[in-house]
């Protein structure tokens, strides 16, 4: 089998989403990959939080931009590649949104070898 065919099959087995934390200061997205066989609300939450370096318990809501709340597995299975997802964090006692955006090096799932790759 040709290498290009294998790459296409591997890529089609994954859903690529653009994810960020809701923040008035930061509006950049990161891309995450989810296996299409494992599309669920809990898996989206787990992978997004790992990549963003936050605790899943901090997340109050997950929104598909511009204005759709994702609430159940069926919602997640309808997502298409490169849709924009925003995590809304729970408010703390001072009614401010929890602000914590760690650097990439602080994240436990950060792959430094992948960051050095060039295409």
Image: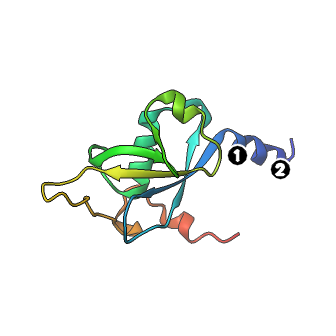
Q: Nearer the viewer, mark 2 or mark 1?
A: 1
Q: Which mark is residue 40?
A: none
Q: Residue furthest front?
A: 67
Disc 2: which residue? 4
Distance Cα–Cα, label 2 vs label 1: 11 Å
Find residue 28 and report its horizontal and vertical position in percent: 49, 67
Answer whether residue 31 is visible to the viewer in this image: yes
- In the picture as drawn, the residue positioned furthest to the right comes out as 2
Read off the residue under disc 1. Answer: 11
Identify the residue shown where x is 75% and y is 40%. Answer: 9
The quarter of the image holding the C terminus is bottom right
Of 49 and 25, nearer the camera is: 25
Report x, y in % for residue 25: 37, 72
Q: Examine the rendered structure and indicate whether residue 101 appears above or below residue 72.
A: below
> Which SS class for mark 2?
helix
Observer able to see residue 39? no
Q: Are marks 2 and 1 in contact (CB under 8 Å)?
A: no
User: Is 42 situated above or below 82?
Assistant: above
User: As drawn, is 43 to the left or to the right of 34?
Assistant: left
Quarter assignment of residue 61: top left
Residue 23 image offset from top left, x and y in percent:
37, 64
Query: x%, y% of residue 117?
Result: 62, 69
Residue at 54% from the left image edge and 68% from the top image edge: 115
Residue at (53%, 32%) from the top-left corner?
Answer: 75
**Mark with earlier residue (2, 1):** 2
Between residue 50 and residue 98, name the one nearer to us.
Answer: 98
The residue lying at 65 percent from left, 47 percent from top is 81
């Amino acid at each position: 089998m040709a290498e290009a065919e294998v790459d296409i099959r591997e890529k089609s087995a994954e859903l690529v989403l653009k994810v960020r934390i809701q923040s008035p200061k930061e509006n950049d997205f990161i891309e995450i990959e989810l296996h299409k066989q494992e599309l669920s609300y809990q898996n989206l939450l787990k992978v997004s939080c790992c990549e963003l370096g936050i605790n899943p318990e901090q997340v109050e809501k997950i929104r598909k931009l511009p204005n759709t709340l994702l609430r159940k597995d069926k919602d997640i299975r309808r997502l298409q590649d490169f849709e924009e997802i925003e995590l809304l964090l729970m408010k703390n006692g001072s009614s401010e949104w929890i602000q914590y955006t760690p650097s990439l090096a602080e994240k436990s799932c950060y792959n430094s070898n992948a960051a050095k790759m060039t295409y």
